[in-house]
Every structure is written in C-alpha cells, then in structure tokens.
C-alpha cells in the first residue's frame, strides 16, 4: 500500500521555517515526506535537510519521494525524542529550523493491518515502529481495569472511561480481545444509548486515541524533543510544531511558554538574582489553524494547530 499522507498546514509551516535562507533544517516527523519535500525543494545550494521517523514504512516512502535531492537530504529511522543524539551522530552543529507534525499519519490510519483505525477490522497493533514494543493487544488484554480507566481518561478524555474499561476486562475474561472490530464494539456497548446517539463521531475514537498514545509513548516524547532541538537552534532559528489534539497542544504550549520566560524573581527584588533569560520568542500570538479550504479538502486538518517560536 502506498504511503499516503496529506501534509497539513504545509505552506504555513515551511514559510515560517524559510529554508531558502540556507543552512540545516530538521523534520522530526518525516511521514510520507510532504513537509520534507517542500523544505528540500526550497533549499539553496549547500543547504541540508535531516528527516527522522520511527516508522520504517515512512522512511521507505520518504526515501523514494526525496531521492532526486541526493545528499542534500539525510533520512534517519529514529524517535524524534532522540533528535539531539541524531544530530550528534551526523556531526551536525547548530540548525536553522526544526519542525514536528505530531500524531498519526493518513497511511497508518488507512492501512488495515496497522490496527490504528476503529473503522477497519484488523489485529490490535497500533505501533508506529513494528520492530518492537508493546502492542494495543498487550494493553487491552494485560492492563488492569484501573490502568485502562486511567489512560482512557487521561489520553482520550473519555467521560465513560470507567464503563469502557470494565467492559473490556469483563469481555477478556471469556476470550482474549484480538481485533480492532472487537474492541470498537465493546467500547460502543459500554456507553449509554443516548450518549451514542448524541455522538458526532464514532464512540470508539477517544479510546483508540488513548491506547495508541500509550502504545507509542507519544506524549512523553514531545517536551524532551522540543527542548533538545531548540538547544541546537542558531539565533533566529525557527521551531514549528503541528498538533492535532488538546493533549499534544497543551504540552507544546507549556514548553514554549517556559522557554519564552525570563526572570522569575519575586516582583519586590531590586535586581534579578535568578539569571534566567528567555530562550525563544513567539512568532505568532495565537496558533495558526488551517484555512476553510484546507479543512474542506482534508477533514483530518480540522483540529490542527501550528505553534511557532524563534530562537533568541
């Protein structure tokens, strides 16, 4: 299956990075290579792009898509939390721009065997890197009712987390839950009929999101990755992050706010003794969101937000 992914906020992100300035740029989430292609296309002679992804299918697709750029582009199979180590391994010093397109790709959702989607019956997997780690089946069949309730509530913001968790545990006592179809049915069954009718989306959406986040440790990687990359930015360098749900966005917003904060001494102090200085400054007061045209063309873009900061 071809690795397809509609790159959200493509031009807004790459315009902010301004790769035509030259230098070194990092795409921490290569995906199918959409943002990477546009960055590489705009790079002048001598410019460099380093693209990371933990999904081997994404690396293969991006390698094919970016092949015409030759050694201008370096692709690395890696979690974006390891961006600092990747730059060290490649001998890259400071960089001029870095971006993240967080969340799951269109390809991962649409390819049945990956087990990300509640719309297709497939083995419960959900790993972005299928070479190791726990699967969604491990979570669903191995976590206690309290553990399931916690992740479904915290990562899915599902108000029926308790009934969903209890229904999963009750069902697995009879037989192991193996497929996305089984899980989606159990989730819907646990919800009151009135709540299901009132839902504008599939009742399994939030729980599937929660399990996917748990399987891939997605939220744990965001802040360390941003901090490591910002540390490598040269003055004037840009960091741009696209998020797709409130959990990601809160982490990005909080991390950027902390990096933008200067002196934290009490107001009554005559002079600063903490010595703290801001590392970055916001480029836009509010996050950039997709245009109506983009939302109409790509419904998955509707919840996207782009936050941009500049290194001081």
Image (cartoon, rainbow, N blue to C red):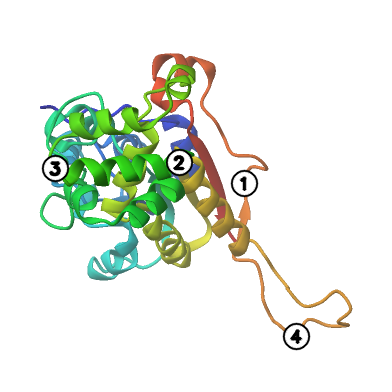
Location of residue 25 in the rendering, given as x and y in whole percent from the top left corner: 37, 51
SS type, badge 2: strand
Estimate the spatial distance between the alpha carbons at disc 4 and disc 3, rounded to whole Å: 63 Å
Q: Nearer the viewer, residue 10 or 116?
A: 116
> Closer to the observer: label 1 or label 4?
4
SS type, badge 1: loop
Dots 4, 2 in contact, CB < 8 A = no
Location of residue 160 in the rendering, given as x and y in whole percent from the top left corner: 44, 38
Estimate the spatial distance between the alpha carbons at disc 2 and disc 3, rounded to whole Å: 42 Å
Dots 1, 4 in contact, CB < 8 A = no
Residue at which label 4 appears: 273
Residue at which label 3 appears: 174
Residue at which label 2 appears: 242
Location of residue 86 in the rendering, given as x and y in whole percent from the top left corner: 26, 64
Residue at which label 1 appears: 283
| Figure quadrant of the N terminus | top left
> Closer to the observer: label 1 or label 2?
2
Q: Nearer the viewer, residue 173 or 36?
A: 173
> Closer to the observer: label 3 or label 1?
3
> Which one is earlier in the sequence, the residue at label 2 or at label 3?
3
Estimate the spatial distance between the alpha carbons at disc 3 and disc 1, rounded to whole Å: 55 Å
């Amino acid at each position: 299956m071809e690795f397809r992914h509609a790159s959200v906020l493509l031009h807004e992100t790459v315009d902010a990075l301004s790769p035509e300035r030259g230098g070194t740029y990092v795409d921490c989430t290569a995906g199918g290579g959409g943002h990477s292609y546009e960055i590489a296309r705009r790079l002048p002679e001598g410019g460099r792009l380093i693209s990371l992804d933990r999904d081997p299918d994404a690396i293969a697709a991006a390698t094919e898509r970016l092949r015409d750029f030759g050694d201008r582009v370096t692709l690395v199979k890696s979690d974006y939390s390891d961006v600092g180590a990747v730059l060290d391994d490649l001998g890259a010093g400071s960089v001029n721009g870095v971006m993240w397109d967080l969340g799951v790709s269109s390809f991962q959702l649409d390819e049945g065997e990956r087990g990300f989607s509640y719309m297709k019956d497939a083995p419960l997997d959900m790993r972005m890197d299928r070479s190791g780690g726990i699967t969604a089946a491990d979570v669903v069949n191995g976590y206690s009712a309290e553990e399931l309730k916690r992740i479904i509530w915290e990562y899915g913001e599902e108000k029926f987390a308790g009934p969903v968790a209890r229904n999963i545990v009750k069902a697995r006592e009879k037989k192991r839950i193996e497929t996305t179809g089984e899980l989606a049915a159990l989730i819907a069954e646990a919800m009151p009929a009135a709540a299901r009718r009132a839902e504008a989306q599939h009742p399994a959406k939030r729980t599937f999101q929660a399990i996917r986040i748990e399987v891939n440790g997605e939220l744990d990687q965001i802040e360390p990755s941003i901090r490591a990359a910002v540390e490598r930015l040269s003055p004037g360098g840009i960091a741009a992050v696209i998020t797709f749900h409130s959990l990601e966005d809160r982490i990005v917003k909080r991390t950027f706010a902390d990096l933008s904060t200067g002196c934290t001494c009490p107001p009554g102090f005559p002079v600063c003794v903490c010595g703290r200085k801001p590392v970055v400054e916001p480029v836009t007061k509010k996050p950039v969101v997709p245009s109506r045209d983009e939302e109409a063309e790509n419904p998955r873009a509707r919840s996207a937000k782009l936050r941009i900061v500049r290194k001081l």
